[in-house]
């Protein structure tokens, strides 16, 4: 990969005419997916993992491939987030391309228009693509910036009755009705990990840091009281006193890196999705962290990353829409 340049111009992209040729027919789409799953040309069973017993079914029925070892038929969608999808692979290829090349993501309404499918189908499709970024384990060696953000509607958008009710409850200016998210960004690698949390107390935020940051890594946070009990090496900026950067001998104290992650996610929230449900918020958070983590890759490599990440991640529609006790976020 070439040296860095403004606008990620060192990355090799793909034009829409190129994508149109890649996914011109279902046959060409199948060849593209096969080239990523089986780069050496040897078919591997998607059920038992056998590399010797799998072969192509000449008739393509009931499915395109069969394994002699486990005596099962399978397809390219088997064992992935695409499993049992009736959509052709060429539409999956287009969806992955559109999602990965839109800086702030693509909405289900736009995808439904671009691909000519139902909006509900596009919505389910995008959530299955987001599964490629779920449950990614990150361990940062530092220095690491940690910060929290709140997602939800703006108080000025609420009705007078709703604002009055919140005021009576003692939430005149607080984050009532919003969902907290905590994120960490490693300054050296520029990698990000983020998690939806129900509390922003010391135990919750400290546990997040312990899960993702090496014990001896230097931390940079704001002046929230939740971190005061930590015994980690830490420097803070006093946002409450309008301090955003502080210079020490040999280091710069700020959380601007992780706040740039919040900036992108919040612009997507307000400008693309408009409304996020707390029960799905983690998927959006994972996706934007994942996109941040692969942003230096060429577009084809990003698409390959998604295709590989969808393997082993089955998402049923009934599980996607199941109530997990969280209410909708307005705005």
Image: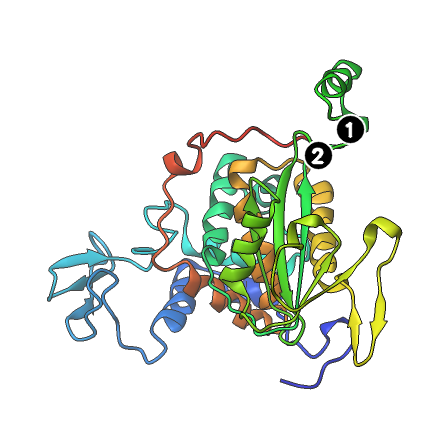
Q: Quadrant of the N terminus?
A: bottom right
Quick check: can you spot residue 209?
Answer: yes
Question: In the rendered view, does 204 fall on the left or right side of 250?
Answer: left
Q: How far from the left and from the top, in percent, is residue 131?
A: 45, 52
The residue that label 2 is drawn on is: 175
Q: Quadrant of residue 218?
A: bottom right
Mark 2 and mark 1 lie on one chain; the one further toward the N terminus is: 1
Extreme-top residue of the structure:
161
Front residue of 282 and 103? 282
User: At 67% from the left edge and 40% from the top edge, which residue is drawn?
Assistant: 151
Q: Against 330, is 193 above or below? A: below
| Label pair 2/1, CB-CB below 8 angstroms | no
Q: Dot 2: few (<14), some (14–19), or many (≥20) neighbours within 10 Å? A: some
Question: In the rendered view, does 31 fall on the left or right side of 281?
Answer: left
Extreme-bottom residue of the structure:
2
Q: Quadrant of residue 108?
A: top right
Q: How far from the left and from the top, in percent, is residue 29?
A: 43, 63
Secondary element at tag 1: helix
Question: In the rendered view, does 113 fall on the left or right side of 22?
Answer: right
Q: How far from the left and from the top, in percent, is residue 103?
A: 68, 58
Q: Quadrant of residue 7?
A: bottom right
User: At 57% from the left edge and 35% from the top edge, which residue is drawn?
Assistant: 277
Q: CA distance from mark 2 to mark 1?
A: 9 Å
Quick check: can you spot residue 98?
Answer: no
Q: Quadrant of the C terminus?
A: top right
Q: How far from the left and from the top, in percent, is residue 240?
A: 83, 49
Secondary element at tag 2: loop
The residue that label 1 is drawn on is: 155
């Amino acid at each position: 990969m070439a040296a860095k340049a403004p606008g990620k111009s060192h990355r090799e992209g793909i034009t829409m005419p190129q994508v149109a040729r890649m996914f011109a027919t279902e046959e060409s789409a199948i060849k593209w997916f096969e080239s990523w799953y089986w780069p050496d040309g040897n078919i591997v069973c998607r059920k038992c993992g056998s590399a010797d017993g799998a072969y192509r079914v000449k008739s393509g029925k009931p499915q395109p491939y069969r394994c002699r070892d486990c005596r099962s038929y399978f397809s390219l969608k088997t064992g992935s987030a695409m499993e049992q999808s009736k959509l052709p692979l060429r539409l999956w290829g287009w969806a992955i391309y559109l999602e990965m090349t839109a800086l702030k993501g693509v909405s289900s309404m736009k995808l439904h228009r671009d691909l000519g499918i139902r909006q509900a189908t596009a919505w389910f499709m995008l959530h299955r693509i987001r599964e490629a970024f779920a449950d990614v384990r990150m361990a940062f060696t530092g220095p690491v910036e940690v910060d929290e953000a709140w997602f939800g509607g703006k108080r000025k958008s609420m009705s007078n009755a709703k604002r009055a009710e919140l005021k009576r409850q003692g939430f005149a200016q607080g984050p009532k009705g919003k969902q907290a998210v905590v994120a960490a960004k490693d300054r050296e690698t520029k990698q990000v990990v983020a998690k939806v949390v129900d509390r922003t107390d010391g135990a919750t935020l400290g546990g997040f840091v312990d899960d993702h940051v090496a014990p001896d890594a230097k931390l940079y946070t704001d002046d929230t009281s939740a971190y005061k009990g930590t015994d980690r090496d830490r420097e803070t900026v006093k946002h409450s006193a309008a301090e955003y950067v502080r210079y020490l001998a040999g280091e710069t104290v700020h959380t601007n890196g992780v706040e740039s992650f919040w900036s992108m996610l919040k612009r997507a929230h307000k400008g693309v999705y408009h409304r996020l449900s707390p029960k799905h918020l983690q998927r959006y958070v994972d996706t934007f962290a994942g996109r941040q983590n692969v942003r230096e890759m060429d577009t084809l490599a990003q698409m390959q990353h998604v295709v590989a990440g969808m393997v082993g991640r089955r998402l049923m529609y009934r599980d996607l829409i199941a109530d997990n006790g969280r209410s909708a976020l307005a705005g």
